[in-house]
Amino acid sequence: MNDYRDLTTREAFGRSIAELGNSNPDIVVLDADLSRSTMTKYFAQAHPDRFIECGLTEQNMIGIAAGLASCGKIPFASTFAVFASSRCFDQVRMSIAQPKANVKIVATHGGITVGEDGSSHQAIEDIGMYCLLPNFRVIVPADSVETVEVIKAAAMTHGPFYIRLGRSKSPVVYGGACDFQLGKASMLREGKDATIIANGIMVSKAMDAATSLSTCGIDCRVINMSTVKPVDKETILDAARETGAIVTAEEHLLHGGLGSIVAQLLASECPTPLESLGINDVYCKSGKPEDLLEIQGLTASGIYDSVKKVMARKRSK
Amino acid sequence: MDENKTADLEAMARKLRRHVINMIYTAGSGHPGGSLSAADIVTALYFKVMRHDPHNPHWEDRDRFILSKGHAAPILYAALGECGYFPIEWFTTLRKTGSCLQGHTDSNLTPGVDASAGSLGQGLSIGIGMALAARLNKKTYHTFVLLGDGECEEGQVWEAALTAPNLKINNLTAIVDYNGIQLDGFTRDIMDLEPFIAKWNAFKWDIIEIDGHDMGQIISALTKAKTAQSKLTVIIAHTVKGKGVSFMENNVDFHGKAPNKAETEQALKELA
Ligand SMILES: Cc1ncc(C[n+]2csc(CCOP(=O)(O)OP(=O)(O)O)c2C)c(N)n1
């Protein structure tokens, strides 16, 4: 196996799907004029007969993928996350979600770290949209190592998947092995005072925040909730019971994603002080990825502050 | 048309191309290829054909322009800045935090931008809406929509193409920047559009085919389309992606890549 650590998540996806194609002849890959960006170009080079270039026809691509799946193929359809969600939502709903088609949608350039391209290209609604769809599994890997494991799991597991990747390089979370299990969160750091639940690029920021918090005596648990749907309820409820304070962090709108799902679960099963970090009902603008994250408070220090806040609420309960 | 006037417009188009190169170089990212291929068409629209007032960007009677291929925003910004919609000093802020010049067109932020774009395929429908509003409001303005050829693969383009004649739209002109390249490669290899003219014909549009870099042909086609109020016209403009910069011409790599310093100097020399 190649070392994927230093790659972007999309690069890791491109290389690993090309490799999986060697051993699994049922895997087909579709793209909509973005194979140079989503990195499906590696699969196109390795398996030209099983690569379908759909051109600028995202809705059509989803339908073709559904048709292929209904005949036993394992289609991986790729485009940018904005187009994979907003552009094809009805096609995804009708042709993939409802019939439980075995289609894996791998969307790259998710979130605001697309940066300079601006709001038209920044997918901030995609996770919420896909979580709304019955039968879908929605996964946001933390780094390139986890991405490879997620792609493998998706190829082996029947049913619709939405996998959201980024454009820029995600900091390494899994320096060594990653034991990704579908539907199971992974606890990256033990802790008893509060819990940070994050996914995607926010996981490494959560780890940084936990390190700083430990220097002022706060023992913070960190959970990588890469599978947003179906969410790992047990791990969330254990954290609520054992630490009594929760912070969520995601590169997505506050509504509809990880924060909403955690809030709903806690409210109904174990009311616990909760602070959520995300994008608060606005479209963002062009700019450097790190600046945009800073503006939205999606930083290690933003998480740090939220943990302090949620712990104050826990104490005053 | 007066030969001097054509030469002036050609000089302006070169100037706008230089702005595009400088802007994208300074930003460090952006789409030079499709900005350069559309440069002559955009120049003709803003400096000759369209009725508009840079001091009054929301003027109700202005002709509308929709850059449906929103990634070519730099060429539109270059034209708007040179017209005086905003100071040309804004050019150096392209794609930066806090800028009014976003990576893709944003009608909230940029004076003179009539429609937000960036997700391809949507502009012709918006244009039909503007054209219908002109009819309902008894206005005489004309709406121009510029599309990419790759963009014409989107289904919505053909839904709009089907709708316009059904709604008897005759105050709108579509222009296709037919440069033969999209993102993954040459359009003929990715998703061939040919026979393209026959498709628009079958959808009941009148067609004018031109060399999209010949200023005389561009002006006469746009003027004819604008004044022929009984017809719905699409101008198929044959263009070269990256036009004007030798190493960008017909080069897929410069669809969405900024030139480096040496390339920028070379490009500006060629566009002098
Ligand atoms: C709906 C949608 N899908 C994909 C993209 C990504 N994308 C941006 S430009 C481009 C190629 C466009 O080709 P064309 O319309 O021919 O533009 P031009 O060559 O004139 O730049 C693609 C695929 C997009 N902006 N919108």
Image (spheres, helix red, strand yellow):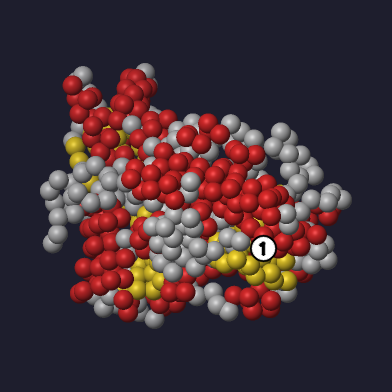
Which quadrant of the view contains residue A157? bottom left
Relative to B102, does residue A303 appear above or below in the rendering?
Answer: above
Which quadrant of the view contains residue A201? top left
Residue A85: image location, x then y, percent:
48, 56
Does the image show residue A263?
no
Secondary structure at badge 1 equals helix
Which of the two residues, A218 or B79, is positioned nearer the viewer here?
B79
Q: Residue furthest right?
A: B138
- Left or right for B154, reference B255: right
Figure disc tally: 1
Does the image show residue A39?
yes
Residue A207: image location, x then y, percent:
23, 35
Mark 1, chain letter?
B
- Mark 1 sits on what residue? B217
Which of the two residues, A146 or A229, is positioned nearer the viewer here?
A146
Relative to A274, does residue A122 appear above or below in the rendering?
Answer: below
- Quarter placement of the N terminus of chain B: bottom right
| Residue visible at 69% across and 58% down in the picture | B219
Which quadrant of the view contains residue B166? bottom right
Residue B192: image location, x then y, percent:
50, 75
Residue B193: image location, x then y, percent:
54, 74
| Residue visible at 63% across and 67% down in the picture | B210
- Left or right for A154, reference A6: right
Which of the two residues, A179 or B266, is positioned nearer the viewer here?
B266
| Residue visible at 57% across and 42% down in the picture | B77
| Residue visible at 45% across and 41% down in the picture | B22
Which of the two residues, B229 or A231, is positioned nearer the viewer here?
B229
- Left or right for A35, reference B109: left
Relative to B17, does residue B222 appear above or below in the rendering?
Answer: below
In the rendered structure, which amino acid carries the disc numbered 1? Gln
Judge: label 1 CB < 8 Å from ligand 1: no
Q: Residue furthest bottom?
A: A71
